[in-house]
């Protein structure tokens, strides 16, 4: 497996060093670090990494500098995969990130880094161009009730599949998680798309887009 | 100098009453001369008002039959109210008496008619009328007395001049007849005249005081109204104090959130990462796993210490359990300079007082450590009546101020929520004394 090179933008030195070592354990090399938005832009320009991991909340105002810097990096290099870490669920961040429809986007809660295996898996998926959305973000989106909500029409199993789909998992991964066959997963998905009146598409990423768009993350 | 020391109830006092009654002070103070002038002109004003009111009111009343009379009455009412306001101004300028306006406020939604109705039904408006109407007879008396007294004084004092011009003067007081042929022999009369001057001043002063009382009675608020004004002022003060208290509480909560986030939360996340990595390495690299677990252990201990400090910053347990003496001793022990602690409280004050006192000491000691460059500090907490007095002194470089949004300003706000007062005495060069007076009931 080719070595993945990342740039980390995180103002807390404690966490930054922890991430570096955590990634190093998995054979992922950190080629650059930054402590604020402009630093991130510089580091990406200088090192041209395969992935940028960015904390939303950074100096000077500690609101959403990281997110804005990430979006700027995306504008300059649309194909650069980015993983954004956030202290709490903010749907708007997810919407901003997914807004340009490009691939290789991740939005996770910071605490996920403690689940080492899953975190590394997410990093690799995003670097490969996939999409990863934190289950808690999906959960919040799903729990919203709106008029004309067709989610009611889904069976509980279909809702589970929907949630996993929205997190950006592949059919195989969903099948593994729910302990069913891939064929069953495919059948559920086509039912879901039908019920929610979404166009059937084999492309994982476009599927996530469609589902998230439906759920109103945009 | 000047201005107004007033109690706005009938029979209260203004400067004309409270200023010194000693002869020399009276001569020197412009107050009495102004009063004399005011009373001298009393007749003119009184007459003017009398004429205006008499003519205006009778005319308006007569013309009510044709509708013209009604607006005329309204104009008269506005006129005499305006006149009353002018009178209050004059009283303030001439006699140093501030009479608060006793008018009822119109309901906020009232239109022009509503406001006029409020004015017409306000007893204060009619008291104004009475004041102005009586101004004439009262002014007459005042004028006559003033004129008599002052002209006599002038005559006596300037007798030498009169003799020099007229050649001869005879002072006939009935009992005593004194003939003055030349200016020199008129001098004794001048001396008597100076004595008369003092009499004149006292008489004027006396009349002015009476006039002031008359003014306050008719132009000022009744006892009930005065009470209402006082309560309104108090309510406003409390509202402001509460707003500051709410702001202070909010700022405090934000600070706690920030401390929790930046401190304990980050640390615990780092610990979780270490443990996660250790788990991943348990079988493949046990040595590395052991090192990680040790690191995680240290991290949890650091997190516990940070949380403990944070809790102490919110409300220290020792203060609840053992009171100010023990808590402040703890603060002093952790301070970088030697701190002398004297706490003399006969009994434990209310919890709010203890809390505010504690945080004032804590913040002051922190500031001393950070900025004062001091070598010695002392904390004194004593009870003075119903007040708890906290004083933190240091021999540092001084120059401490309460910057808005800063720690000391925050303490002042906190003290203000229980009507306490924070005083900062910190000249550049030192020493600095931070003093808080905290009431035990509020």
Image (cartoon, grey):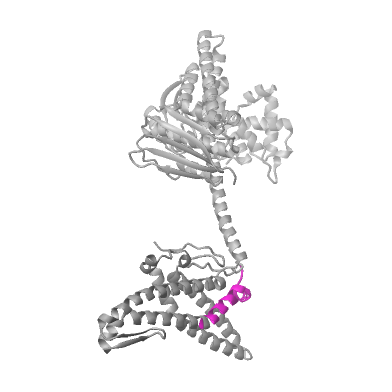
Q: Position of residue B75 (x, y in %)?
A: 55, 82
Q: Is residue B323 magenta?
A: no
B53 or B287, nearer to the observer: B53
Q: Residue at x 56, y 65 (%)?
A: B9
For the magenta stretch, what is the residue range? B109-136
User: Is residue B116 in the magenta section?
Assistant: yes
Disc count in the image?
0
- Asked if one can make out residue B302 in the rendered structure from this viewpoint, the answer is yes
Say if residue A10 shows up in the picture: no
Q: Quadrant of residue B36?
A: bottom left
Compared to residue B269, the image places residue B160 above or below, namely below
Q: Residue at x 56, y 80 (%)?
A: B77
Q: Within the image, what quadrant is residue A179 found in?
A: top right
Question: Along the horizontal axis of the image, is B310 left or right of B364?
Answer: right
Q: From what the image shows, is residue A79 above or below residue B157?
A: above
- Residue B129 in the image: state x and y as whole percent: 56, 79
- Residue at image point 71% right, 32% down: A158
- Foreground pick, A63 / A174: A63
Determine whether A102 is above or below B1 in the image.
Answer: above
The majority secondary structure of the magenta stretch comes to helix
Q: Is residue B413 left or right of residue B192?
A: right
Residue A92 or B66: which is nearer the viewer?
B66
Say left or right for B430 vs A195. Answer: left
The picture places residue A147, in percent across and down from the top left corner, at: 70, 46
Q: Residue at x 35, y 76 (%)?
A: B192
């Amino acid at each position: 497996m080719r070595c993945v090179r990342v740039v980390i933008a995180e103002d807390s030195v404690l966490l930054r060093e922890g991430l570096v070592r955590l990634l190093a354990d998995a054979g992922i090399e950190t080629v650059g670090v930054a402590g604020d938005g402009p630093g991130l832009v510089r580091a990406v320009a200088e090192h041209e990494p395969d992935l940028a991991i960015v904390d939303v909340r950074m100096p000077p105002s500690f609101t959403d500098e990281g997110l804005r810097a990430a979006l700027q990096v995306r504008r300059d290099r649309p194909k650069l995969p980015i993983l954004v870490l956030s202290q709490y669920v903010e749907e708007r961040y997810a919407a901003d990130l997914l807004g340009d429809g490009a691939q290789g986007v991740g939005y996770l809660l910071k605490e996920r880094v403690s689940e080492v295996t899953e975190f590394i898996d997410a990093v690799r998926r995003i670097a490969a161009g996939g999409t990863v959305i934190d289950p808690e973000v999906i959960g919040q989106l799903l729990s919203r009730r709106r008029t004309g909500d067709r989610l009611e029409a889904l069976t509980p199993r279909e809702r589970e599949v929907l949630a996993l789909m929205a997190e950006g998992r592949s059919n195989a991964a969903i099948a593994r998680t729910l302990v069913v066959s891939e064929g069953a997963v495919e059948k559920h998905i086509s039912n879901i798309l039908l019920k929610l009146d979404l166009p059937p598409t084999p492309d994982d990423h476009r599927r996530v887009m469609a589902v998230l768009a439906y759920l109103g993350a945009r | 100098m000047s201005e107004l020391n007033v109690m706005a109830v009938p029979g209260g006092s203004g400067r004309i009453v409270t200023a010194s009654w000693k002869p020399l002070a009276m001569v020197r103070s412009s107050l009495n001369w102004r009063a004399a002038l005011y009373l001298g002109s009393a007749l003119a004003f009184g007459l003017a008002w009398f004429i205006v009111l008499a003519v205006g009111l009778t005319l308006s009343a007569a013309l009510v039959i044709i509708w013209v009379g009604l607006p005329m009455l309204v104009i008269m009412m506005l006129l005499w109210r305006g006149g009353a306001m002018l009178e209050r101004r004059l009283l303030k300028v001439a006699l140093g008496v501030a009479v608060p306006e006793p008018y009822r406020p119109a309901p906020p939604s009232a239109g022009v008619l509503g406001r006029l109705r409020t004015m017409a039904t306000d007893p204060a408006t009619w008291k104004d009328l009475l004041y102005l109407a009586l101004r004439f007879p009262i002014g007459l008396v005042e004028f006559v007395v003033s004129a008599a007294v002052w002209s006599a004084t002038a005559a006596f004092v300037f007798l030498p001049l009169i003799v020099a011009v007229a050649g001869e003067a005879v002072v006939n007081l009935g009992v005593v007849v004194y003939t003055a042929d030349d200016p020199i022999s008129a001098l004794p009369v001048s001396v008597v005249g100076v004595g008369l001057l003092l009499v004149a001043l006292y008489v004027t002063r006396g009349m002015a005081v009476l006039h002031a009382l008359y003014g306050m009675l008719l132009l000022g608020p009744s006892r009930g109204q005065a009470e209402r004004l006082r309560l309104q002022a108090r309510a406003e003060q409390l509202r402001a104090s509460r707003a500051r208290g709410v702001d202070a509480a909010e700022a405090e909560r934000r600070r706690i959130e920030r401390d929790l986030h930046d401190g304990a939360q980050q640390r615990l996340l780092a610990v979780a990462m270490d443990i996660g990595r250790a788990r991943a390495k348990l079988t493949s690299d046990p040595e590395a796993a052991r090192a990680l677990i040790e690191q995680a252990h240290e991290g949890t201990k650091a997190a516990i210490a940070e949380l403990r400090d944070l809790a102490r910053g919110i409300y220290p347990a020792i203060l609840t359990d053992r009171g100010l003496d023990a808590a402040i001793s703890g603060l002093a022990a952790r301070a970088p300079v030697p701190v002398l602690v004297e706490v003399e409280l006969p009994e434990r004050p209310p919890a709010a007082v203890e809390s505010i006192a504690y945080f004032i000491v804590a913040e002051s000691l922190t500031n001393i450590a950070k900025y004062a460059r001091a070598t010695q500090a002392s904390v004194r907490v004593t009870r003075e009546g119903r007040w708890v007095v906290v004083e933190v002194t240091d021999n540092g470089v001084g120059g401490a101020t309460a910057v808005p949004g800063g720690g000391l300003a925050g303490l002042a706000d906190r003290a203000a929520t229980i009507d306490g007062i924070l005083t900062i005495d910190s000249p550049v060069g030192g020493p600095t004394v931070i003093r808080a007076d905290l009431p035990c009931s509020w």
